[in-house]
Image (cartoon, rainbow, N blue to C red):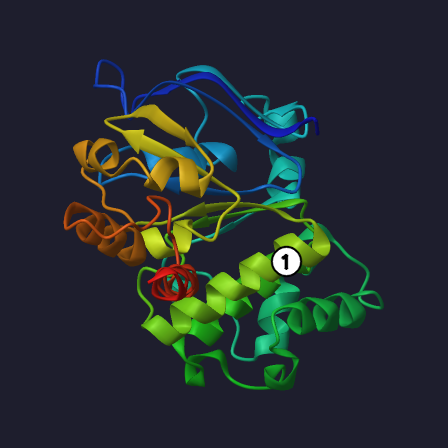
Amino acid sequence: MNQAHISLQNLCYAYEEGAPLAVDSVSLDIRRGEFVALLGHNGSGKSTIAKLLNGLYTPTSGKVLVSGMDTADDRNTWEIRKRCGMVFQNPDNQIVATVVREDVAFGLENLGVPSERMPRLIDDALRAVNMLEFADRAPHLLSGGQKQRIAIAGILAMQPEAIVLDEATAMLDPSGRQEVLETALRLNRERGVTVVWITHFMEEAARASRVAVMYKGSLVMDGSPREIFSQVEKIRRFRLDVPPMTRLSAMLRERGVGLRADILTAEEMLEEVRALAHKA
């Protein structure tokens, strides 16, 4: 088994002294190269965890370790943020330059990367998100999905080992959401980047290798997408739903149709329906 890349150890966080815990006694190990979807209703603590992973917040108690480094140790802060990149909900908040190439260079400049190394790193990062052809464009002319991919490229240029995406598709249309999700999946699959994908879209979480569910600050479910989403009634108790095809499968099974309980995608539903038709 791979060593934990990111480790949350009895993690607690309160926004101010005496306030209720926004994150309450959460323990979670994320292995190197995993794609973990973190789910939860608004106020469940998932975005707070995102900021704790990157060292933007430090724990009230417990620990967060990134590649073995404690986020509460100020000596580790810069290295942790280099190794564990953060992509936020609104790409406009991360774009700082008037030309795409210059925007991707921003993080490298802050790291003190020699200027002669930058063009290759920038081109590699833009190529990884399929945006190299837009290198000399103005970011404000791009679509929301394209802007978010530029934000990801800016993180990738710094060659992180992990990326945390906090509701990175929430402000995008379906096409833009798909662009960004496929980009993250490809980086995970082809480059081995550890991905923490925080979302409220169940169909996105279904594409992860693992799903963790937060509720009122606590970790309440952890398993594969099939394990989690086949428990329809349980996940609904945590004010969440299941992917559309899983929901449809549950409705049809209630009406006596012999479908599997763990269908996640339209492709799987089609296969099941074809199999039933063949048996009939």
Residue 251: x percent and y percent? 18, 51
Residue drawn at point x = 62 percent, y = 73 percent = 102
Residue 7: x percent and y percent? 56, 25
Residue drawn at point x = 42 percent, y = 41 percent = 226
Q: Which corner quadrant holds the C terminus?
A: bottom left
Q: Which residue is mark 1?
A: 187
Q: Secondary structure at mark 1?
A: helix
Quarter-of-image position of residue 270:
bottom left
Q: Is residue 31 above or below residue 197?
A: above
Q: Is residue 42 visible?
A: yes
Number of on-image labels: 1
Q: Which corner quadrant holds the N terminus?
A: top right
Q: Is residue 258 above or below residue 239?
A: below
| Of 19 and 164, the residue lying toward us | 164
| Of 146 and 229, the residue lying toward us | 229
Residue 215: x percent and y percent? 26, 29
The residue sitting at the left extreme is 255
Residue drawn at point x = 40 percent, y = 57 percent = 168
Residue drawn at point x = 22 percent, y = 42 percent = 240
The crowding category of the residue bearing disc 1, from other C-alpha atoms within 10 Å (few below 14, some 14 to 19, many at least 20), is many
Residue 60: x percent and y percent? 39, 17
Left or right of 102 in this view: 241 = left
Q: Is residue 184 above or below residue 76?
A: below
Q: Amino acid at mark 1?
A: Leu
